[in-house]
Every structure is written in C-alpha cells, then in structure tokens.
C-alpha cells in the first residue's frame, strides 16, 4: 500500500537558519510526491511536486525539495527560514491505483525571531 | 482565492440541529473531496465524488450526508452531530479522480465547525 510518513510532529528553527521538514514514502513503482502548506484556519496550499526529472524541485516561497530514491525520501528545505514560514506542512503521495493523494500526518514548523 | 470556495467559514450548531456545508469550485474540475481535520490529527478523507458520482465513502457515520448536484458544487449535510465532530472541514477538487495529469488538489479555506 502507498504511504507517506512525516517523522517529526514539530520542527523549531531560528529565523535566518536553514530548515528541513522530513518525509519518507512507500510506493510500488515511480512515486508522484507533493508538499502542501497550511496556515492557521486555512486550507492546504500547493508548494511543489515531484513527478520526474531533476531530483531537486523548486517551489513557491523559496522552498525546494530533494527527491532521494535510494532513501525513499522527499524532504522539504529552505536555505533561510522566515517567521512567516511558520505553518503546518503536509507531504503527500499519489496512490498509483486510484489516483487520490495520500497525506502524511503533518509537521508543524515554528520559526522564531 | 484558490478557486474553491467554502461557506460558511464558521458554524456553531447544537447536537439536534440540521445544517449544511457548501463547496463551490470554478476550476472546471471533475472530482471533489471532503476532508475532516481534527486538532492534532491527520487529514481524514471522508467522501470522493467523480463526475457527480460518489466513488468513495470512508466509513463515515450516517449523520454526515454528502450531495453533489453537479461537478461545481458539493454539499455536506449534517444532522444530530456529536461534540467530537467539531473540526475543520475541508473541500478539495482536482481535474479528475485518477488525476493522470498529476495536478494535485486545490483546497478551499475550510469550515470551522463547533458542535455544542
């Protein structure tokens, strides 16, 4: 069965420091992977996706994610965190059978000044 | 605006009330989804509609009743809810249920439901 795991419930980073939000996946075949961000009392917003091609994917708001097939990971990164990046981040993988997205449990990112 | 609009944004209802949540998308998508998001819990997929036909119902209690009159509108009818049903209810849409384009989902801002 397809699945994603976000091993950290919360990540704390100082403003200006690099940030990483971790995601690992389990799929049969080639994975289609997504990152979404959710600000308080809002819906999820698309950040970036990996379908094929370069392992480093660039997305919105300066975020990028690195696809690593050998480690079955798709970690979200940003070189310099902003306080406004504080939000809930979801990793998702497309279910190859039915096509729907399967979401991880979410990681709360807190960036302090 | 994402192109997916949910109303109302906030709703407080008693356990004996009947209310409805509305979702409308202006993206020309053919698949629509209802998710429940409780505090400190992952997203729970409730229902999936493809071309106005329900294709998934993930063991949701009958006090939640979805309706999809056309591909642009999705409703969630609520009756005799319990306090544990208090949550953020999110609607999403995608070009198709199988999403062969890998477009992903577009979410609305959600309805914050409180059952008292």
Image (cartoon, coloured by chain):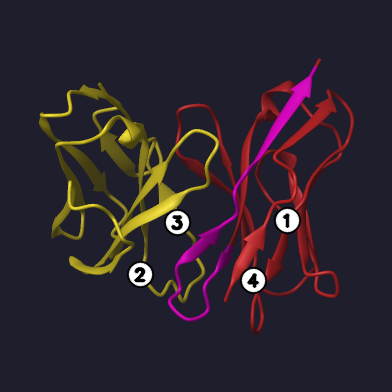
Chain colours: A red, B yellow
The residue tagged with tag 4: helix, strand or loop? loop
Location of residue B29 in the rendering, given as x and y in whole percent from the top left corner: 31, 61
Q: Which residue is identified by label 3?
A: B105
- Magenta range is A93-112
Nearest to the observer: residue A84 or residue A108: A108
Q: Dot 2, how many residues are within 10 Å of its Cα: few (below 14), some (14-19), or many (20+)?
A: many
Which quadrant of the figure has residue A92? bottom right
Location of residue A112 in the rendering, given as x and y in whole percent from the top left corner: 79, 19
Which quadrant of the figure has residue A42? top left
* Quarter of the figure that contains the C terminus of chain A: top right
The residue tagged with tag 3: helix, strand or loop? loop
**What subunit carries mark 2?**
B
The residue tagged with tag 2: helix, strand or loop? loop
Residues at marks 4 and 1 on the same chain: yes
**What subunit carries mark 1?**
A
The residue tagged with tag 1: helix, strand or loop? loop
Nearest to the observer: residue A3 or residue A30: A3
Residue located 25% across and 34% down the image:
B82
Q: CA distance from mark 4 to mark 2?
A: 17 Å
Q: CA distance from mark 4 to mark 1?
A: 16 Å
**What subunit carries mark 4?**
A
Describe residue B76's horizontal placement relative to residue A71 as left or right: left
Q: Which residue is identified by label 4?
A: A51
Mark 2 and 1 residues: CB-CB less than 8 Å, in contact? no
Which quadrant of the figure has residue A87? top right
Q: Which residue is identified by label 1?
A: A23
């Amino acid at each position: 069965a397809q699945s994603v795991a976000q091993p950290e419930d919360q990540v704390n980073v100082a403003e200006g420091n690099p940030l990483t939000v971790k995601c690992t996946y389990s799929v049969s075949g080639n994975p289609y992977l997504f990152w979404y961000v959710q600000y308080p009392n809002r819906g999820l917003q698309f950040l970036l996706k990996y379908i094929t091609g370069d392992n480093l994917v660039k997305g919105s708001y300066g975020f990028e994610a690195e696809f690593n097939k050998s480690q079955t990971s798709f970690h979200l990164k940003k070189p310099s965190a902003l306080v406004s990046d504080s939000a809930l981040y979801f990793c998702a993988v497309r279910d190859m059978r039915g096509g729907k997205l399967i979401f991880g449990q979410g990681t709360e990112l807190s960036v302090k000044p | 605006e994402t192109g997916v609009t949910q109303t109302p944004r906030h709703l407080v209802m008693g356990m004996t009330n009947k209310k409805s949540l509305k979702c409308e998308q202006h993206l020309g998508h053919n698949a629509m989804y209802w998710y429940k998001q409780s505090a400190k819990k992952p997203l729970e997929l409730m229902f999936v509609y493809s071309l106005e036909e329900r294709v998934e119902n993930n063991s949701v209690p009958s006090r939640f009743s979805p309706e999809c009159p056309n591909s642009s509108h999705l409703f969630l009818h609520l009756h005799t809810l319990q306090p544990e049903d208090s949550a953020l209810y999110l609607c999403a849409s995608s070009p198709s249920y199988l999403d062969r384009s890998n477009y992903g989902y577009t979410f609305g801002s959600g309805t914050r439901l409180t059952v008292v």
